[in-house]
Amino acid sequence: MTGADQSSVAILNGARTPLTRAGTLFKEVHVTDLARSTMQETLYRCELAAGRVDEVVFGNVVMPADAANPARVAALWAGIPNAVPALTVQRNCASGMEAVAHAAASIRAGDAQAVLAGGAESMSMTPLLFPHSAVAPFTAMAKAKSAFRKAAAASHFRPRHFKPVAALECGLTDPTCGMIMGKTAEILAREFGVTRKEQDDFALRSHQKAAAAADKLNDEISPYYAGERFEPVTADNGPRPNQTPEALAKLKPIFERRDGTVTVGNSCQVTDGAACMLVANADWARAEGRDVLGYVRGYAVAGLDPSRMGLGPVFAIDRLLRKTGVSLNDIGLFEINEAFAAQVLACLKAIGSPEFARKSLGRSEPLGEVDPERLNVNGGAIALGHPVGATGARLVLTLLMEMRRRDGELGMAALCVGGGQGAAILLERK
């Protein structure tokens, strides 16, 4: 599609919850309620009646058993009419961005004028999984009618049946290469020569930038009342304003304990949160006299070796640049999700590498250089956190709001995706 075709999709406004570390302020909040709150706030900010929404699309990774299509449940709780369909999409870490892309595609196809799109995740409520061998004795217990039969069924339990595994750990382990995501970051650190100090320095800057940007980030945050708290949660609780290089240096490697470099300090935080935007036909928005935050110029996804999944942004950015005809030097602001400091730093080296361009991208020249001063200017997931289903949408919202502050023309957001994929979106404010 041409640039003109792409820019026919507008993003009017949006909102997100505060991002809170798993097990803290949102530990008992259902993912559908996090999503609901952002849907309602987005409609309020856009001054749009719920009945004028044509579709709801939300990303979610760890779909709850009691809300099999969380987008639909959240939409109904938000007051969206029964007649409006809702879809939950799952592309691991890019799920929230995929929701925005799906909304844009529906609008370009003429199937919708206004779509609520975003993502939500409750990492706190990721369940514990009992081994499959426990199914038979539990089933026998449930079917037993008498105390005698229940006792007989209970006799088949063994200690191994009561050793649950955290579903979060399973979800962060790729079944095709057998690696937990942190080990893929270690591979990239070795391949691209990313040192432990470089990773810790990057993590420190993430916290410093997020702390300095707290007032700006308030523009996108909608307060949330969690549980019986009288005071609302109004800010992210991940950034550490007093983080020091000495504290980061003391942390031991977590994935390769003997000679690894990836620690909990230079990795993203496990987080709860949600983000939402109103994606609309630009002609419809103009006809209604509505303000526009920005436009979706293009979107691209790419696949790669799952064991090097952290390079996904490079492959997706390459595909998106080819698709839109834009040069990397044209981009004024970048967001690359900070799954791991090693992963982002490896991406930056790959983007500027002539050898990587030739061998992996089929280009005669490297993609270019990303100015660190234009990357993740308000901090990233190392400080703010990574609610996996929501992050892609959060990046879009954060980027567009910063582009508005700077009167920037083009911005790009990208993520690596567990399972060996990458996603990137090009936004404009022309």
Image (cartoon, grey):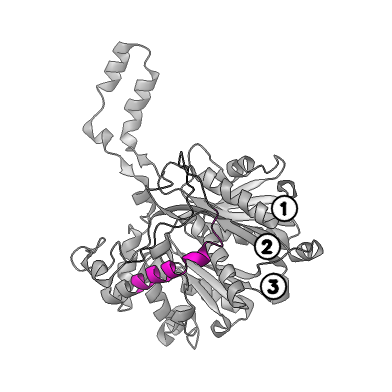
In the drawing, does residue 137 fall left or right of residue 289? Answer: left
Magenta segment main secondary structure:
helix
Give the crowd class for mark 1: few <14, some 14-19, many >=20 residues within 10 Å.
some
Which residue occupies 45% across, 68% down?
A: 304
- Is the Cβ of the residue at disc 2 closer than 8 Å to that at disc 1? no
Q: Position of residue 226 (x, y in %)?
A: 47, 44
Q: Is residue 167 visible?
A: yes
- Between 130 and 81, the residue placed more toward the observer is 81
Check disc 1 and report its element: helix, strand or loop: loop
Q: Which residue is mark 3?
A: 1
Find the distance from the CA under tag 2 to the CA under tag 3.
22 Å
In the drawing, does residue 152 fall left or right of residue 16? Answer: left
- Is the Cβ of the residue at disc 3 closer than 8 Å to that at disc 1? no
Magenta stretch, residue numbers: 202-222
Q: Which residue is mark 1?
A: 48
Q: Earlier in the sequence, mark 2 or mark 1?
A: 2
Find the distance from the CA under tag 3 to the CA under tag 1.
29 Å
When asked about the image quadrant of residue 181, the answer is bottom left
- Between 200 and 6, the residue placed more toward the observer is 200
Q: Amino acid at mark 1?
A: Leu
Q: Earlier in the sequence, mark 3 or mark 1?
A: 3
Tell us which disc is closer to us: 3 or 1.
1
Tell us which disc is closer to us: 2 or 3.
2
Q: Amino acid at mark 3?
A: Met
Residue 216 part of the magenta-drawn span: yes
Q: Position of residue 214 (x, y in %)?
A: 47, 65
Residue 376 part of the magenta-drawn span: no
Q: Quadrant of the N terminus?
A: bottom right
Q: Which residue is mark 2?
A: 12
